[in-house]
């Protein structure tokens, strides 16, 4: 991406499609956010788990999200560059967002790139750092071409029901009051290596549903994006802004 005047925004873990009234309210807040982006916005980085689940077939995609996809298409048409980093809930994309929205879809665990004059390491965050064997095995299973082919040989009705059950079960197994462990956190250790070895200015990840800014080596920063379950969380290159049920501030 070429350096240019304008603003770049980063967010993750909206989990569109989660059941319940609160999820519908979350979708409305996300739509309000997209509609309120400043006119000088140059890039929007969606860092995974934007959808609570997404299993995409050649001619079938999950029902819903029409208004969100429409707003993303409007932004793309207005010149905003869209980047979609696949998360652990919406990894099974093919080319739908690329063809319909012109989005850059990234399936790698992270990408190092220059954005707005900064050298950044960006990703969802689920596949970086040292992880337990069971988690690595599960990731290998979900990313296996063979098992994806088996999955997609089944009827979408069955697969979508299975995906929804897995998604809701995943939330029950992970507490909502997670506390970041600082320098003991695997994602912090990974980010600190990126700063020292790749000379990045900052690392930006989601996944942990915890919004914070913390220091790395050499005065660099790790930004973690919060989830949209109870508020609106996003990052621009000038700092983190978080609010409750209102919209975050847009000023620099």
Image: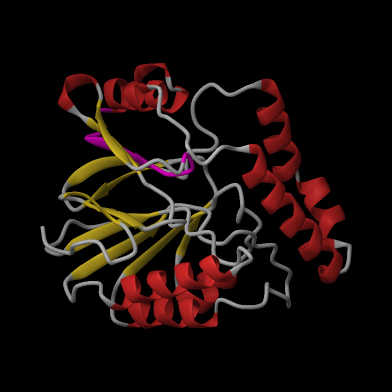
Side of 194 relative to 117 (left or right):
right
Between residue 2 and residue 245, name the one nearer to us: 245
Q: Is residue 37 above or below residue 142?
A: below
The majority secondary structure of the magenta stretch comes to loop
Between residue 103 and residue 219, name the one nearer to us: 219
- Image coordinates for residue 141, horizontal then vertical, percent: 76, 39
Side of 64 relative to 154 (left or right):
left
- Image coordinates for residue 144, horizontal then vertical, percent: 75, 43
- Image coordinates for residue 126, horizontal then vertical, percent: 53, 38
Query: What scheme was used to colour the molecule?
Result: secondary structure
Q: Residue at x 51, y 41 (%)?
A: 176
Q: Is residue 13 magenta?
A: no
Q: Residue at x 39, y 71 (%)?
A: 29
Q: How many marks?
A: 0
Side of 109 relative to 150 (left or right):
left
Q: Which residues are magenta?
A: 199-208
Q: Residue at x 52, y 78 (%)?
A: 100
Residue 83 placement: quadrant = bottom left
Q: Is residue 203 magenta?
A: yes
Side of 154 relative to 241 (left or right):
right
Query: Can you say which quadrant of the picture contains the N terminus?
Result: bottom left
Q: Residue at x 83, y 70 (%)?
A: 157
Query: Can you say which quadrant of the picture contains the C terminus?
Result: bottom left
Q: Is residue 224 above or below residue 243?
A: above
């Amino acid at each position: 991406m070429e350096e240019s005047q304008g603003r770049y925004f980063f967010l993750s873990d909206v989990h569109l499609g989660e059941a319940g009234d609160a999820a519908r309210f979350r979708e409305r807040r996300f739509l309000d956010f997209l509609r309120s982006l400043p006119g000088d916005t140059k890039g929007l980085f969606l860092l995974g788990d934007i959808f609570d689940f997404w299993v995409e077939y050649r001619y079938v995609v999950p029902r819903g999200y029409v208004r969100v996809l429409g707003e993303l298409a409007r932004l793309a048409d207005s010149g905003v560059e869209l980047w979609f980093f696949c998360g652990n809930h919406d990894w099974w994309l093919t080319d739908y967002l690329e063809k319909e929205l012109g989005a850059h879809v990234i399936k790698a665990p992270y990408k190092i790139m220059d954005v707005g004059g900064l050298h950044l390491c960006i990703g969802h965050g689920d596949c970086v750092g040292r992880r337990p064997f069971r988690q690595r095995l599960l990731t290998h299973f979900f990313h296996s071409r063979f098992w994806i082919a088996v999955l997609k040989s089944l009827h979408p009705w069955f697969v979508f029901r299975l995906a929804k059950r897995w998604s809701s079960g995943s939330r029950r197994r992970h507490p909502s009051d997670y506390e970041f462990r600082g320098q003991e956190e695997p994602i912090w250790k990974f980010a600190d290596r990126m700063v020292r070895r790749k000379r990045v200015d900052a690392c930006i990840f989601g996944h942990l549903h915890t919004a914070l800014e913390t220091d790395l080596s050499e005065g660099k920063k790790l930004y973690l994006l919060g989830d949209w379950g109870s508020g609106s969380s996003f990052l621009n290159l000038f700092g983190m802004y978080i609010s409750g049920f209102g919209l975050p501030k847009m000023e620099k």
